[in-house]
Image (cartoon, rainbow, N blue to C red):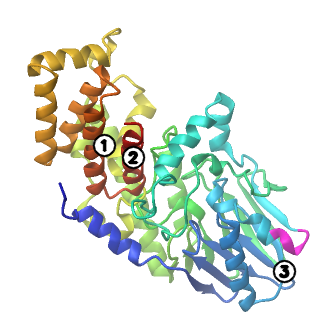
Amino acid sequence: MKREKSAATLRLEVRQSTLFPHMIRAGERVWQAVAYDESNVSMIVGNDGVILVDTGMLPSVAQEIREEFRKITPLPVRAIIYTHGHGDHTGGSPVFAADGEVQIWARSNFGAEVALFESAGLMMQFGARGARQNGAKLPPELRSGTGLSPLRAVMPSGAAFNGKQGAIHPDHFLENERRELELCGVRLELFAAPSETADALCVWLPDDGVLVAGDAMYRSFPNVYPVRGMPCRDVPSWIATLAMLRKYRADALLVGHGDPWIGREAVDKALTNYHDALEHVFRETVAGMNRGLGPDELVRTIRLPEHLAGLDELGEYYGNVAWTVRALYASYWGWFDGNPRALLTGFGACEEAARMVELAGGADALFQRAQAALHDGDVGWALRLADHLLALEPDAAEYRLLKADALDAMSEDMLTTSGRNYARTVGMELRETM
């Protein structure tokens, strides 16, 4: 059954069409290479060398950016500052560090996010789930970019986000909350900015009025919970970081993904909206939890206020409001939703599936109902019924195909690109094993 393109798909295609490589001058001596790679690369031109903030992900693209920067200045790279440990911000470092001795700065807890999975022995599954989220296994025509970067930026598996694979490890560290220093004759302030990651830092150029925020902000609702798996990111700290960024009264705000904001009024408005959106979801979730609501009830009611929901820069391209609500709930209450039924043990998926089949009048009847639900656009119910069937017969080709088709339909209606990629990849995996 061929489906018309959904509103989500059309909106994402419009967003993706605006993402093309370009160079932006954000200050007298500050440039940013935007949308060449999965993340942006910023260049600060000093007296006897340049300072880079982040390096992108792919060495081949880093070489392209390096050549573009050399058209602006022939000065060598003398320092690199990582805003955090994700590989899409660090993987290009060997290319930029080829000029000679280069200082590489980061927070002292650099790589803290992935260290959690490493210490638990979960890196294999972390990589597998990351590959699904990033669409690494999908053919180009089915893969969705993050909505923040060009489709040409092919994402690797999640294991590449550990800041170690191919990237040069930092050798200079921000040990405290804040540090002023001078590099290449440029005054800088590095400060801790817990947000998308616990190891995040931002860079302030006081003589230029330029703030480089990394992934503390980008042109999407914040990614509080990545579907590859992660404990809920520290939302109160992220909100506090955004409030702190406003106090700098910057004339330009450079971010890790997407175009910067230029002009003090534009910067302040963008930071205010981003702060208010995240704070609204947090406060509404906590208020609902205090009323005794469970996660399913909360996600049905919590939305961004109208004046924020209409902003494209807060679209759910990368982060997702409902996923944020669920992650917040789990971070405070854990797996128990307050319903005593959840305290039962020994009543598993297979037993529930068997009883559902019995209620439906047999597996064939349940299968027909699932097919009808999918045909009628009731994708969630079709997936639920498909899972019941697969719990009893996991190798049945018709059930695997049903779920794969339902996942394709789900991805079509989903704006958040990591969810689209994950659903499409699982659907592809189901078909491959039929």
Q: Distance between the residues labelled 2 and 3?
A: 46 Å
Which quadrant of the structure image shows residue 274?
bottom left
Element marked by disc 3: loop
Residue 404, label in figure: 1
Question: Which of label 2 and label 3 is nearer to you?
Answer: 2
* Left or right of 290, for residue 3: left
User: Percent from the top left, x then y, of residue 421?
Assistant: 41, 52
| SS majority, magenta | helix
Residue at (39%, 52%) from the top-left corner?
A: 279
Residue 22 seen anywhere in this rendered image of the structure: yes
Given contact means CB atoms under 8 Å apart, are the residues at marks 3 and 1 in contact?
no
Q: In this image, 268 relative to 409: left or right?
A: right
Which tag, 1 or 2, sits closer to the chain's start?
1
Q: What kind of element bears circle 1? A: helix
Amino acid type, callout 2: Met
Which residue was labeled with disc 2? Answer: 428
**Residue 197 appears at what percent x and percent y?**
59, 50
Residue 404 location, x and y as percent?
A: 31, 43
Task: Tell whether position 183 is magenta.
Answer: no
| Nearer-N-terminus badge (3/1) | 3
Earlier-in-chain disc, 2 versus 3: 3
Pointer 3: residues within 10 angstroms few (<14), some, or many (20+)? Answer: many
Q: Is residue 206 in sight in this rendering? A: no
Residue positioned 16% across, 31% down in the render: 367
Q: Name the residue under label 3.
A: 76
Residue 30 against residue 111 in the figure, above or below: below
- Identity of the residue drawn at 75% across and 71% down: 188
Q: Which secondary structure lies at badge 2?
A: helix
Q: Give the range drawn in magenta.
A: 97-101
Check contact, mark 1 vs mark 2: CB within 8 A.
Answer: yes
Q: Kindly identify the amino acid type of the residue bearing the numbered disc 1.
A: Ala
| Distance of label 3 from label 1 (alpha carbons) | 51 Å
